[in-house]
Image (cartoon, helix red, strand yellow):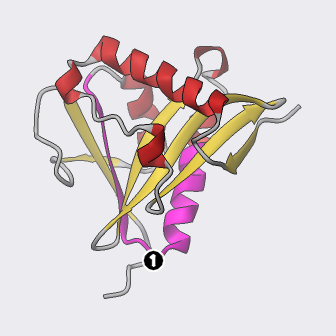
Amino acid sequence: MAIAINIESPLQDDVRALVSELNAVLLKLSPPEFCFHMTVEQMADAKTTVLIARDEGKAVACGALRVHDRGIGEVKRMYTRPDYRGRAIGGRIIDRIESLARDKRLSHLVLETGNQHSAAWRVYERAGFTRCGAVLDYPDSEWSVFYEKRLTNQAAA
């Protein structure tokens, strides 16, 4: 069966488990003060749209779009379970996030990721993101790598 990606609530038990797994992975790679986690409760707010990839009903990957002021969209909570990596699921989620951002007439997307996440960097770079300086209110540190992507639809003034 094909993997389906849909907008869902993060407040489901299996999505909570997926996000918990993501948090554990991130904490192995970066000091806690440089892990900028959103809780599932924060993910459920009106500024955030959560995408869940499912294989025969099982939550296997996630990602989110958080809308900020000035036409900025932030890519958050990207994760694919190890058994599902290498199947372009992350790229499909990024494509959906970009489509949502364009629908919302955002001017660009930004993201922060860790300095040891080379697999994630490849996903973002394949999707047309380029490295940039610190974004939003993230500290510029050795633990973070920042990306941005300008969108053709410019946000209304």
- Is 102 contained in the magenta span? yes
Seen from the viewer's position, the closer of residues 12 and 91 is 12
Tell me if residue 55 comes above or below residue 44 in the rendering: above
Q: Quadrant of the C terminus?
A: bottom left
Q: Which residue occupies the foreground of this view, 148 or 71? A: 71
Q: Is residue 12 above or below residue 157?
A: above
In the rendered view, does 14 fall on the left or right side of 129? right
Question: What residue did someone put label 1 on?
Answer: 153
The x and y percentages for residue 144 are 21, 32
Q: Return the residue nearer the eye: 125 or 145.
A: 145
- Amino acid beneath label 1: Asn
Q: Is residue 43 above or below residue 36?
A: below
The kind of secondary structure element at disc 1 is loop
Q: Is residue 18 magenta?
A: no
Residue 16's spot in the image, x, y percent?
56, 30
Q: Note whether 155 is above or below 28 in the view shown.
A: below
Which residue is pictured at 69% across the width and 30% down the height? 59
Nearest to the observer: residue 119 or residue 47: 47
Left or right: residue 76 compared with residue 27: right
The stretch of residues the image draws in magenta is 93-115
